[in-house]
Image (cartoon, rainbow, N blue to C red):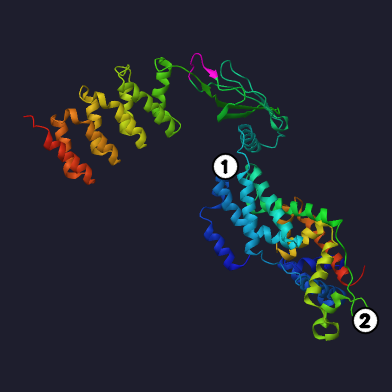
Amino acid sequence: MDGPERVQERQQTRAPEAELIREAQAGSRAAFDALVRQYEQQVLRLALHLTGSEHDAEDIYQEAFLKAFRYIGNFRFECSFYTWIYRIVTNLCLDQLRRKKTRREDQAVVVDHSGDEIDVLASVSDNRSFSNPGKELDRKMLGERIQAALNKLTPRERMVFELKHYQGLRLRTIGEMLNTTEETAKNTLFRATKKLRSQLAGLR
Amino acid sequence: MNCEVAHERIVLGAYGELTDEQVHELERHLATCPECSHERQQVLALQSLAAAHPVVEPDANLVARSRLRLEEALDAVPPKRWYERLAQSIAKNVSSLQSAPVAASLLLIIGGGAGTLAGYEFAQGRLAHVAVRPQVAQIQNAQPLSDATPAEISNISSIARRPNSELIEVRYNQIVPQRIEGSLDDPTIRQLLILASENGSSVGVRDDSVGLLAAECRAGHGCKGEGFRDVLMTALRYDKNEGVRAKALEGLEPYVSEDMRVRDAVLEAVLYDSDPRIRTAAINILEPVEADTSVRQVLSTVANSDHNPHIRNASREILSRAPVIQ
């Protein structure tokens, strides 16, 4: 998270988190609201990037915090609250990804002006696209290309890549959040990067 | 290091998951293996490519919309039923016991006359042994509030696991709501009203009970020797709510001349009550005993030192009216 955001959130927190959690468990709505404010930005950021839709992100936010509200009594301080919340969110995201998987249209291959397939990965790795106007790729198109490639991953691979690459979490944390081992998370990451590379190299 | 392992290490290295030693090992391998070097180029390219789909900060409107919707949904959630809270507290305590699958049994043994618990289902069919101890003193002719109202658990007093067994014994105390109807002549009702004046769960309850007792005293019904007067004096001295104190004062009014204790309580109110209206009302009640020396002393003090100018004036006025008794 960025520096200024972090400071703002710390200022908003008047009580240490454990106290807030205990109060929320005892039924304090105000305490629960304070917890929501602490995590809502992160939750939305993750859901938004993963689903690409504000509407879907909002739904995930709603479900996640309602679940948290309902089950906060079960939180036993064995892991951090951060991990606990993220576990709820990632599971909801996984469900969402699984639902969407069947409907997604694939645009795996990009074609240039002459109809040849572009090896997007190659062009980026040697900066061709940025120096050669003939094969210039729109930043936006590139973004869409990436999204398409990401959508070809399985929900779990997508999730692990998202948490590792985009959210910067450690593999061990990712394992905890997905209720699996670090080793499994690692292997999932390898599969994801391999798949992405073959996608972006223009192979089908 | 073989190339397969190196490929994995390259990915881990790109994401900062290698130890320093592993990083060094990998660098040594890459220095001599062009294929793996190329592999690393590819991984780095992937990383920079992925940046073309950046993480955006959710805009303020989205956050606000989402939070509003959540607040509405939370407002609609009914409060936890007592057995849900019980389930949670049992689960919490049980989880701190070593391993043991939680096959707890919750069996409610209903003590005779302690109340009824009708028709509820415990989540996931869990049961536990409990001992029920009635919290409220036995009162004859009491009826349980209604069949549909479950009794409230006031606390869990112990949890014990039988050795070598999956059974867990939970002991808890229940508060059983009761009701009773009767007239003000009924000694039980009077007893409960006295309790309520000090012990009411809400200001409203204290207010109602003190109001009833005060009305009885003003009407002269059995205020003597019933302890009602004591109750009103206690309420006047110590109740935190001005409305309750005001009612208590009203109830004591008829007795200010005949009962010294009542007079003292009212004098204390004149001097020390935090609410000026009560101080004023108390001063007015003292009219029949204005001539009394102790009363005049108090009124003098008040005439000089009360913060409230109206009260100072009222006291001075009374002092000037009543003849001084030598």
Q: Is residue B298 left or right of residue B129?
A: left
- Residue at 78 percent of width and 54 percent of height: A96
The kind of secondary structure element at disc 2 is loop
Q: Is residue B239 left or right of residue B58?
A: left
- Residue at 55 percent of width and 49 percent of height: A31
- Find the magenta span and give its range: B137-143
- Residue at 80 percent of width and 85 percent of height: A131
> x and y percent of residue B269 in the render?
26, 35
> x and y percent of residue A98 in the render?
82, 54
Q: Is residue A26 above or below residue B139?
A: below
> x and y percent of residue B119 in the render?
67, 24
Res A146 quadrant in image: bottom right
Specify the amino acid type for callout 2: Ser
Mostly what secondary structure, the magenta segment?
loop
Closer to us: mark 2 or mark 1?
2
Chain bearing tag 2 is: A
* Circle 1 residue: A27
* Circle 2 residue: A114
> x and y percent of residue A125 in the render?
82, 78
